[in-house]
Amino acid sequence: MSIFPSRRRRPQPRSTGELLSQFTDLDGIPITPPTTEPDQPIEQAGRRSGGRQRVNQATAPVQGPREPGRGWAAVDASRRAPVYRATTAEVGGLFPLLASNGVPAIGARLGYDTQSGGAFYVHPTEWVLRQMVTNPNMVVFGEPGRGKSSTVVAVMLRMMLFGVRSLISGDVKGEYTPLLRSLGITPIALGRGSPHRLNALDLGPIRTRWSSWGVERQREELTGITARWTRLLTALAEAQGYDPTVTDELVLSTVLTRLVGAADGYTELRPITIPQVVAHLAEPADDLWRELRFADRRQFLDHTRPITDALSNLVVGPLSGLFDEPTNFDLDWDAPVQSMDLSLLRSRGDQAIAVALTCLGSWSSMITDLQDDGDVRIVVRDEVWRQMRLGLRAVQAVDSDLRLSRAERKIQLLVMHKPSDLLSVGAAGSQEVSIAKDLLALCSTRILLGQSTRVGDELADELGLSEREQAVITGWAMEGQGRALWKLENRPGMKIQTVLSATERAIFDTNAGLRSAVTDQPDGGASPRPRLVAVPTADQAAADSAEADHALAAAGDLARRNGARR
């Protein structure tokens, strides 16, 4: 009897064929390992090799199968697994984890696609060149607090690395001012207590470039600027409740041409202001009313009295002193971003802000039209519905800018809360509402942040969203800031999470004032309540954060170099 306990006998290992036969029955899999000789039994081969059976028996020649198009392979892979043939659309449905978002990896890296897990890049002009969209314009919808401003600022900041400058054509709430100050740029503030004045009829860079142009170029530029001024003045008159006629437009165009000095042989342009236009309408010269084919001076005064009074309200009304005096500041158009801060105008009412937005829109359009060849500029129109409430001509001005964006190398970026903002620009069924609703078709890129169910229904109707896309807006996008459904025309929507670096979060924090007011309250020594935020994976967050900080530093260096050069 042995003093050692008996050992349990180990089972014999299963052969390769037995293992494979229990897990698969693919054609071509040998259920028994091949023998070394055709007629030799497996048992004899095992005894000859020392009783041990080789597992990885070759099933193909060393050089692989000698067939056209097969190439070299150590094993015949086509016999070990089935081969499927399908289109990329079908493969994307069968293997969704292998499908990308379809956006090329070029431009500003904004965040990541939560469906594919890949990085998401933004470059509207490149999308046009690749025929992914028909125009570079963008529109942003989202409830307050969902991350509209931070998304817009992130796009502007990171596109600076690709030579794209930005212009905020009217910062109603002053949300973009921290970004400019962080880049060493002083924004232009208009309103209560500010010494800045912006002439709505300012010549801008035209005056300095005028002498270097030929006669034909001078005539072309002068025709364009007088037409822009005429549209601006008629839109401002319409905002006062008067609907200008074609005769009024002819009168304004003639007066502007005379005041600017074009009638003197195009020698040198003179700066003009709205009070000068009002003075020429109220006290017309004899040759003016004769040139315009009025019977006498009295007929001219009677016909132009309504538009004269409407423009006079801009001189003595709530906007007096803002747009009726010569411009007293120099705007650095070589800076990576510029802004018009209108937050000081809020005390003067919504109409004052709307008129200011209209003046700034016309002025900035004239300035950007003269940009150097090859330059691309983002024009941000925050709360554009305020401007369009002024009347039909204000709506037509926005519509014209959107239609010409591709030819003028601009990226118009509209920021709104909900689609019903466009319905408030006029009466139901009016021409203003019809044009305003068509503006969405002129913005190929739609950025849809979190919305309530009612607004989600509106977006679904206006943009033709599917039920799944609508559920993303009202569900997933409402669970965190910076979440949005990016929809490029008729392409399927993409669930994009914008990622901000720590530096960007500090600059873009629109709740800083509210948070400081809450934390300043005495709480008996209690520590601040921690906030739970949704964050991406560590690798994605680190990559996006590093790129965002790099963009901020590069933009700051560009602004400082421009300042030193000047």
Image (spheres, rainbow, N blue to C red):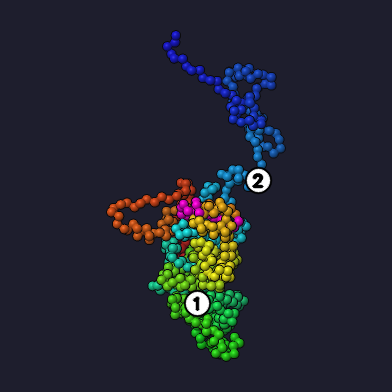
Sequence order check, earlier mark of 1 and 2: 2
The boundaries of the magenta stretch are: 474-490
Q: Percent x, y for residue 139?
A: 53, 61
**Foreground residue, 319 or 436?**
436
Label of residue 87 in the image: 2
Q: Is residue 5 left or right of residue 212?
A: left
Q: Is residue 558 left or right of residue 31?
A: left
Task: Give how far across and how far down residue 497 sits, in percent.
Answer: 49, 52
- Rendered residue at 60%/46% (across/down): 92
Which three-letter amino acid code belongs to the residue tagged 1?
Answer: Gln
State if disc 2 and disc 1 touch (CB < 8 Å).
no
Q: Is residue 410 above or below residue 82?
A: below
Residue sitting at x 53%, y 76%: 238
- Residue 5 in view of the camera: yes
Q: Which residue reaches farthest right?
A: 68
Dot label at residue 240: 1
Residue at 47% x, 68% y: name it. 170
Within 10 Å of disc 2 (Cα), the crowding (few <14, some 14-19, many 20+) is: few
Question: Which residue occupies the extreme left position in the image?
Answer: 524
> Does residue 362 lie above or below 40 as drawn?
below
Q: In the image, which is nearer the foreground, mark 1 or mark 2?
A: 1
Displayed quadrant of residue 50? top right
Q: Amino acid at mark 2?
A: Thr
Placement of 481 over or under 409, stated as above or below: above
Residue at disc 2, secondary structure: loop
- Residue 488 drawn in magenta: yes
Q: Is residue 318 left or right of residue 444?
A: left
The alpha-carbon separation of the residues under discs 1 and 2 comes to 60 Å
Residue drawn at 49 percent across, 84 percent down: 279
The spot of residue 369 in percent (x, y) is 56, 69
Q: Which quadrant is home to the N terminus? A: top left
Q: Is residue 328 left or right of residue 435?
A: left
